[in-house]
Image (cartoon, helix red, strand yellow):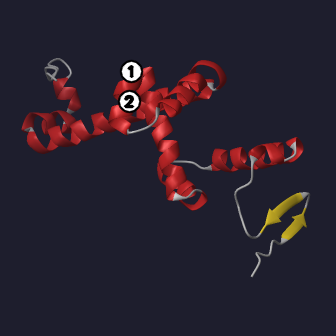
C-alpha cells in the first residue's frame, strides 16, 4: 500500500501531515522570516527559568533539547579555552560539531557569547545561594550575621578559603 501525502495550505504556509521535518532551503525566504519571527517572539515572551523549561519541553523533542544543550556546553568550554580534544573526550561529540560551534562563536553568532556570559552569571549566583544555605545550616556565627547584620558592620566575617 502506498503512502498518502496530504498537504493543506493555510495562510501561505504548507503543512504536511506525514512529516514535520522540512529542509530550510526549500522554504521561501518570506515564509522563513515569518516562521523565525514567530519563534523569536514566542521565546522572547517567556519569563523565568521554569517557564522557559516548560516552553522548550513542549516545543522540542528530548533529542533536540539535548543537542541544543550540548552546543551550549561546547560554547562554554571553547570560551573557557578548552581544546577540541578535551571537549571531544568529555562530551563525546564529533570534531565537526565543535568546529561549527567555534565558527559560530567567531563569525556569525555573537549572541552565543552573550548567552554564555549571562549563563555564567546565573551559575555563579546559584553557587553563592547554595553556599549561603550551607553556611546558614552549619555556622551559628553566619546565622547571627544574617539575623543582625548591623552588629557585624564593624567586624566583618573573614573570607572563606576555596
On the image, numbered disc 1 is attached to which residue?
83
- For label 2, count other residues whose C-alpha is less than 10 Å away and answer few (under 14), some (14-19) or many (20+): some
Q: In the rendering, at what x and y percent does residue 109 appear? A: 63, 26
On the image, numbered disc 2 is attached to which residue?
87
- Left or right: 16 in relation to 21: right
Image height of 161 relative to 39, above or below = above
Q: Provide the secondary structure element on which disc 2 rests.
A: helix
Do we see residue 60 in this rendering? yes
Residue at left 60%, top 50%? Answer: 46
Q: Nearer the viewer, residue 141 or 74?
A: 74
Residue at left 85%, top 48%? Answer: 31
Image height of 116 relative to 81, above or below = below
Image height of 153 relative to 146, above or below = above
Q: In the rendering, at what x and y percent does residue 36 appear? A: 75, 45
Q: Nearer the viewer, residue 19 or 34?
A: 19
Between marks 2 and 1, how big is the CA–CA gap? 6 Å
Q: Nearer the viewer, residue 53 or 90?
A: 90
Residue at left 50%, top 37%? Answer: 71
The quarter of the rendered structure image containing the C terminus is: top left
Q: Quadrant of residue 88?
A: top left
Q: Nearer the viewer, residue 116 or 86?
A: 86
Q: Provide the secondary structure element on which disc 1 rests.
A: loop
Q: In the rendering, at what x and y percent does residue 81 appear? A: 39, 18
- For label 1, count other residues whose C-alpha is less than 10 Å away and answer few (under 14), some (14-19) or many (20+): few
As drawn, the residue found furthest toward the bottom would be 1
Do we see residue 125 in this rendering? no
Discs 2, 1 touching: Cβ within 8 Å: yes
- Left or right: 26 in relation to 127: right
Q: Quadrant of residue 161?
A: top left
Q: In the rendering, at what x and y percent does residue 150 appear? A: 22, 27
The quarter of the rendered structure image containing the N terminus is: bottom right
Amino acid at each position: 500500500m502506498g503512502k498518502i501525502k496530504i498537504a493543506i495550505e493555510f495562510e501561505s504556509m504548507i503543512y504536511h501531515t506525514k512529516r514535520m521535518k522540512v529542509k530550510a532551503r526549500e522554504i521561501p525566504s518570506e515564509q522563513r522570516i515569518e516562521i523565525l519571527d514567530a519563534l523569536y517572539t514566542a521565546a522572547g515572551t517567556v519569563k523565568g527559568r521554569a517557564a522557559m523549561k516548560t516552553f522548550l519541553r513542549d516545543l522540542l523533542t528530548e533529542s533536540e533539547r539535548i543537542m541544543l544543550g550540548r552546543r551550549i556546553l561546547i560554547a562554554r568550554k571553547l570560551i573557557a579555552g578548552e581544546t577540541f580534544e578535551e571537549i571531544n573526550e568529555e562530551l563525546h561529540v564529533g570534531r565537526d560539531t565543535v568546529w561549527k560551534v567555534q565558527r559560530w562563536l567567531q563569525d556569525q553568532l555573537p549572541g552565543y557569547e552573550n548567552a554564555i556570559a549571562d549563563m555564567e552569571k546565573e551559575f555563579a549566583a546559584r553557587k553563592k545561594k547554595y553556599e549561603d544555605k550551607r553556611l546558614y545550616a552549619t555556622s551559628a556565627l553566619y546565622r547571627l550575621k544574617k539575623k543582625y547584620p548591623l552588629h557585624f558592620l564593624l567586624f566583618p566575617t573573614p573570607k572563606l578559603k576555596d
